[in-house]
Image: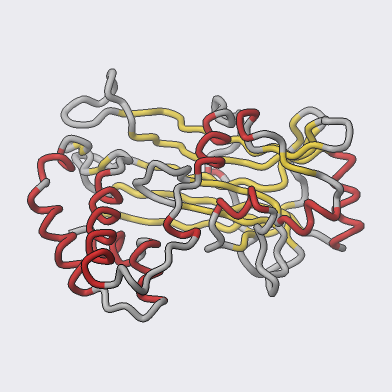
């Protein structure tokens, strides 16, 4: 149960990176999931065979991993950034929530090179991620349309670099030394930490002469005059309920969930002077559930 989520969990992947055999701890995780099966059912919409986001799985994984480390590797294991809660991003994303903007849904977007970049007042949308849940009938034929859009010097690849922890944003270390793409995308599922984060790499932020604002102002960067130049925004829209309800007080399953990254227009020109020619690319993914 939940094998794919368990196998791709960052805590377990980190142990495997260190050469630790994780088969025993994975077995203990599965046993605890079965023991607490009724907790997971609380977050399920049976009519459509889907579940809302919750932290129960990651909580079980985190508890069992730490127990395993303490019992078997406590004298040789050193916690790194992968095992620390990203409180700064957690606070910032709370203040970055907005109502969903009036933009096309992922299912309405054509994949490929885009001629125009969306304007939002004095800003332009330099990146966007969104997941659209499309419900079938009687719990069958559910699907998801997912879009990845952003400025990139690479025409034929996804516009984002991934697998860099969002916590590195606040240490000015959010980049990969061999990565050409300028915008990073962080994603986590069923966790207390932010689910999706888009941000520009720290080296480019430095080249633009920008610095991070305080996290209680949201995830954004300011210039020397304390004016906002770069701003992350996120949203959850068209919520449906858990359990037997479709819409109600317990509505927590988002049919549209996403985020974008805005940059002031005058700084977009500076960005192009630093990086060179940039393209706004849309990549899509479709997931079907039968």
Q: Is residue 258 visible?
A: yes
Q: Is residue 290 visible?
A: no
Residue at the spot x=81%, y=53% of the render? 206
Is 70 on the left-hand or right-hand side of 210?
Answer: left
Residue 7 place in picture, x, y as percent = 30, 67
| Residue closer to the observer: 15 or 140 | 15
Residue 78 sits above or below residue 88 on the image: below
Check the image and name the residue furthest to the bottom.
19
Residue 247 place in picture, x, y as percent = 29, 22
Q: Image quadrant of residue 26?
A: bottom left
Residue 284 place in picture, x, y as percent = 53, 56
Residue at the spot x=30%, y=51% of the render? 58
| Residue closer to the observer: 100 or 264 | 264
Q: Image quadrant of residue 267?
A: top right
Residue 274 place in picture, x, y as percent = 88, 59
| Residue closer to the observer: 34 or 77 | 77
| Residue closer to the observer: 48 or 97 | 97
Residue at the spot x=21%, y=43% of the render? 49
Residue 133 sits above or below residue 236 on the image: below
Is 58 on the left-hand or right-hand side of 104?
Answer: left
């Amino acid at each position: 149960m939940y094998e794919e989520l368990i196998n791709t969990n960052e805590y377990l992947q980190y142990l495997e990176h260190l050469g630790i055999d994780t088969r025993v701890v994975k077995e203990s995780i599965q046993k605890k999931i079965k023991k607490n099966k009724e907790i997971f059912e609380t977050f399920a919409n049976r009519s459509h065979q889907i579940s809302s986001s919750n932290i129960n799985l990651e909580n079980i994984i985190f508890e069992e991993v730490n127990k395993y480390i303490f019992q078997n590797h406590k004298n040789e294991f050193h916690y790194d950034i992968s095992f620390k809660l990203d409180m700064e991003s957690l606070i910032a994303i709370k203040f970055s929530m907005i109502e969903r903007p009036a933009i096309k849904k992922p299912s309405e977007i054509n994949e490929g090179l885009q001629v125009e970049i969306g304007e939002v007042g004095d800003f332009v949308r330099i990146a966007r991620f969104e997941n659209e849940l499309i419900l079938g009938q009687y719990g069958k034929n559910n699907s998801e349309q997912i879009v990845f859009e952003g400025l990139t010097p690479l025409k034929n690849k996804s516009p984002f670099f991934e697998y860099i922890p969002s916590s590195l944003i606040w240490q000015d270390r959010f980049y990969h030394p061999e990565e050409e793409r300028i915008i990073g995308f962080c994603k986590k599922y069923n966790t207390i930490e932010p689910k999706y984060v888009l941000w520009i790499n720290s080296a480019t932020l430095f080249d633009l002469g920008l610095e991070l604002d305080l996290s209680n102002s949201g995830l954004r960067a300011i210039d020397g005059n304390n004016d906002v130049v770069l701003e992350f925004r996120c949203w959850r829209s068209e919520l449906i309920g858990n359990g037997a309800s479709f819409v109600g007080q317990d509505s927590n399953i988002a049919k549209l969930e996403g985020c974008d990254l805005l940059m002031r227009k005058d700084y977009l020109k500076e960005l192009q002077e630093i990086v060179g020619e940039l393209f706004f690319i849309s990549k899509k993914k479709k997931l079907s559930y039968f």
